[in-house]
Image (cartoon, helix red, strand yellow):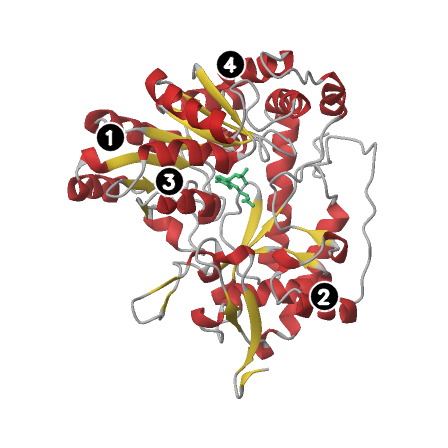
Amino acid sequence: MVFKTIIEPFRIKSVERIRMTTEAERNQYLHDAHYNPFLLKSNQVVIDLLTDSGTSAMSSEQWAGIMRGDESYAGASSWQRMESAIQDLTGYPYILPTHQGRAAEHLLYTKIGGVGKVFISNTHFDTTRANIEYSGATAIDCPCPEGKYPEISHPFKGNIDTTTLLSLIEKYGAGNIAAVILTVTNNSGGGQPVSMANARDVHTICKKHTILFILDSCRIAENAYFIKHREAGFEGKTYREIAQEMYSLADGCVFSAKKDAFANMGGFLALNNLDLAVQCRTVLIITEGYSTYGGLSGRDMEAIAIGLEEIFDADYLHYRIKSTQYLADKLHKMGVPIMMPSGGHAVYIDAKAFYPQIPPHEYPGQALVCGLYKVGGIRCCEIGSVMFGKYDANGKLIPAAMELVRLAIPRRVYTQSHIDYVAETFEGLIETKEQVHGLRIVHEPPFLRHFTAHFEPVTLSSGVA
Ligand code: F0G
């Protein structure tokens, strides 16, 4: 018999209580958090879909590994296990452990970045862009045309636009391009996958122009699932083989182990080039820790080594992608405008289409984020003009290309009934959607403003509620 029901391919051994709250309580909490869910306390949240990063449930094998963690300062056995797990997977010889992905980004992008340098990516993630811009360099997003339209269905909407990439290389000069970064899956572009064909094209272009090709690969196992099921020629390959092939096309990678390694903390930079690795390692030792632990405990390194094996389990990946799709399909059937097709780790709502009455400078995505919290206690994250908006010389907002809201699904954490509850919350939101107003920012820092900005609700008639 072929089953229609895809079950969670794990049993639950240890549970965490969810504190239930009322809508009235949540209204108060949201007000106190300045309408920014990043400022909420976790016990004020019913279902936490803020991120899939560091929020995975670890397996009993990982917990067992944690007890084995070797906390020696230098040359710990846990480091050796982590290092060889990464070398086996990526094929890169030089591995630099870091406390999380952005530390790996910082090591590499401050080394190769700086004023006058340009980075080109399918879409830079927010910390990637911030690290690059902080170094004085410029970060240019170059997603494929299909990737810019949430409603268009395409198997590889995460691809980089190679035509634009070539014209940018010509415009800035290959010598000024610090790196081309392919983010797999493309998190800020809707969690959409990148095809092997696209990675091969980037490889060829970078080789021809002698430009460094870096994979931001923290969801490479999820990306491999899409390649196996959507790209001709990969049906017979394992997910791991597909990931290995993609790594073989690049010169190195940054990796946040908080995603596709089921770890609560960790990351690494892996490189082919010894010279570059030596330069980055010097900064690693100054800022993160000695080269055989970076910012990590031995127990973290054990969890990462084991997680990197588990993530390629075919039953897990099937459940993972199908369960994300389950939520996407439900919302789609209800008429909620979502990024099509659904991504690997998250469902992205097109907030511009959900709240057409709210202009970009009143942040429709943030309004939806607040609505989901008020009605269902669901915490999620805006990926639109709050995260990526910039101001022109007159202080006018230059909006982001899309106004998305991301429902990120932590790995192995929530069951189907939690997801059904999320969908039901949308039923409540749909009923009142015409009456919803936007928000305005009343306080913001210069970098990564979405984490700490304060908002106030706006009413159409009077300005501020
Ligand atoms: N690159 C991508 C594509 C990411 O999604 C993230 C983190 C990072 C780099 C940085 O890794 O958090 O370990 O420092 N993404 C999280 C998210 C925060 O919610 O999507 P980190």
Q: Callout 4 environment at 10 Å: few (<14), some (14 to 19), or many (20+)? A: few
Disc on res. 159: 3
User: Which sits earlier in the primary sequence, circle 4 or circle 2?
Assistant: 2
Whether tag 2 and tag 3 are in contact, CB under 8 A, the answer is no
Percent x, y of residue 191:
50, 44
First-in-chain label (2 vs 3)? 2
Q: Is residue 328 left or right of residue 387?
A: right
The spot of residue 336 in percent (x, y) is 57, 62
Does residue 20 appear in the picture of this structure? yes
Compare marks 3 and 4 and give the one earlier in the sequence.
Answer: 4
- Residue lying furthest bottom in this view? 461
In the rendered image, the quadrant that contains the N terminus is top right
Residue 36 or residue 203, whichever sits in front: 36
Instruction: Report x, y in % for residue 132.
Output: 37, 43
Q: Residue at x 48, y 59 (%)?
A: 445
- Please name the amino acid that badge 1 sits on: Ile
Q: Quadrant of residue 116?
A: top left
Could you tell me if the residues under marks 4 and 1 are in contact, i.e. CB atoms within 8 Å? Answer: no
Please tell me the numbered disc located at residue 205.
Answer: 1
**Label 1: how many Cα within 10 Å (few below 14, some 14–19, many 20+):** some
Q: Is residue 99 above or below residue 187?
A: above
